[in-house]
Image: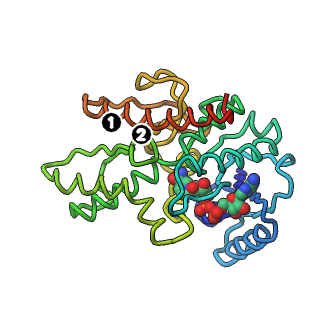
Amino acid sequence: MKILIIGAGNVGAHIGYLMLFVDSIDEVLIYDIQKDILKGKVLDLSHAGGVLKKDIKFTVVEDLNEVEADIVVITAGVPRKEGMSRFDLLEVNTRILDQVIGGMNKRLIEESIFVIVSNPVDVLTYYFYNKTAIDRKRLIGMAGALDNGRFRYYLSKNIGSKITELESQVIGSHSKDMFCVFDNLGAEGRVELSKKETKEAGATIVSYYKGGSAYFAPAAGVKVFLDVILGNREETVSSVAILDGEYGYNNIAFGVPVEMSSKGIDKIIELDLDSSQKEELDRSIKGIKESLSFLKDKKILS
Ligand SMILES: NC(=O)c1ccc[n+]([C@@H]2O[C@H](COP(=O)([O-])OP(=O)(O)OC[C@H]3O[C@@H](n4cnc5c(N)ncnc54)[C@H](O)[C@@H]3O)[C@@H](O)[C@H]2O)c1
C-alpha cells in the first residue's frame, strides 16, 4: 500500500511519522516545494523506521506527475495565523491547491483516494471536486475526526467519563459553525462547556503557537481515516463529503458521519436531527456557501 503525502510541513510530517504505526503500509512518498526540508524530513523518518524496526520505505517525490499511490493526503497550504480571515486563508490555499492539482498526473486523480486536510477544508474539498471531477466516493476531507476527538477530550475532562466510553459526533463545517452531538445524560452545563471549548480549540492552539496551527491531533485524525480505509479499525467517522441530496443539500462539501472502506466513502449516514439541530446544520451550510460565493466573485471558482 502506497501513501502519498503532499506538503511536508507540521501536519504532513506528523502524518508521515504516524504511518510507522499503521498496518499494511509499504511506502510513504512525500512531496513539498521546499526541497531541502523535504529531504531532511524523509531521511529523519527513514531513520525512525530503522529505530522502530519497521520496513516502511520513505521516498522523496521530485515530480508529482511521475508518482502513483493508493491514497493521497493533501496538507500543502498555509496554516491559519492569528489575525488572518478565513477568506485570506482561502485565497492563498486555493492557489496552492491549483498548483498541486496542476502537477498531478491524470491516473492519480482517476484512481487514488484523496484525503484533503488543507484549510478551509470543507471549501477546499469542494474546490478539489469542482476542479478534478473526481468520483465523490474517493474524496474525503479531514475535519470531523479531529473535531470529534477534541469534543471527546473536553467531554471526558468536564464530565469525568473515559474517552473510550464516549459516543459523540461532530458534524457540519470545520469552523465555529460545527455542531457537536452528544446525549447529555443530565449534564447539560458541562456538555455545553465542552461544545464551546471544542469550537474554540483550533483558535486556542493558534493563540499558543503564535505562527502555526495544530498538528498532532490533525495528523491523528488522518491516521484514523487511513486505519478505517485499510480495514485496521471499524467505526463510523465524521468526514467532509460531497453531498448529493443527503441532509437536503447537493453539490457542497460538508462534515457528516460516513462509512468508509478500501474504495473510499461507502455511505453517508443521515442522522435524525431535531428542528434546532437542523437549524444549526443550515447555518453551517450557509457559512460554507459564503466562502464559495467569495471564490465565485473573485472568479477563482466557476
Ligand atoms: N483539516 C484540519 O482539521 C486541519 C488541521 C490542521 C491544519 N490544517 C491545514 O493543513 C495545512 C498545513 O498545515 P501545517 O501546519 O502543516 O502547515 P505548514 O506551514 O507547517 O506546512 C505546509 C507545507 O505546505 C508546503 N507547500 C506550500 N505550497 C506547496 C505546494 N504548491 N506544493 C507542495 N507543498 C506546498 C509548504 O512548503 C509547507 O511545508 C494548512 O492549510 C492548515 O490550515 C487543517
Residue 121 occupies which quadrant of the picture? Answer: top right
Disc 2 designates what residue? 172
Q: Counting residues from the N terminus, which is met first, the one under dot 2 or under dot 1?
A: 2
Residue 161, image x, y percentages? 24, 61
Specify whether residue 52 is in view: yes
Q: Residues within 10 Å of mark 1 (few under 14, many from 20)?
A: some
Seen at 25% across and 28% down, the residue is: 275
Answer with left or right where residue 134 lies relative to residue 206: right
Q: Whole-percent x and y of residue 247?
A: 41, 26
- Quarter of the view holding residue 30: bottom right
Say few, some or many: other residues with alpha carbon within 10 Å of mark 2 (under 14 / 14 to 19 / 20 or more): many
Q: Which residue is nearer to you in this view: 15 or 286?
A: 286
**Residue 109 got which mark?**
none
Q: Which structural element holds mark 2?
A: loop
Looking at the picture, which amino acid does disc 2 mark? Answer: Gly
Q: Is residue 234 above or below residue 293?
A: below
Residue ranking furthest to the bottom? 51
Q: Which residue is found at the position 56% from the left and 66% from the top?
A: 212
Whether the residue under disc 1 has CB within 8 Å of ligand 1: no
**Of the pair 65 and 17, the residue shown nearer to us:** 65
> Is 193 displayed left or right of 27 in the figure?
left
2 vs 1, front mark? 1
Looking at the image, which is closer to me, 233 or 120? 120
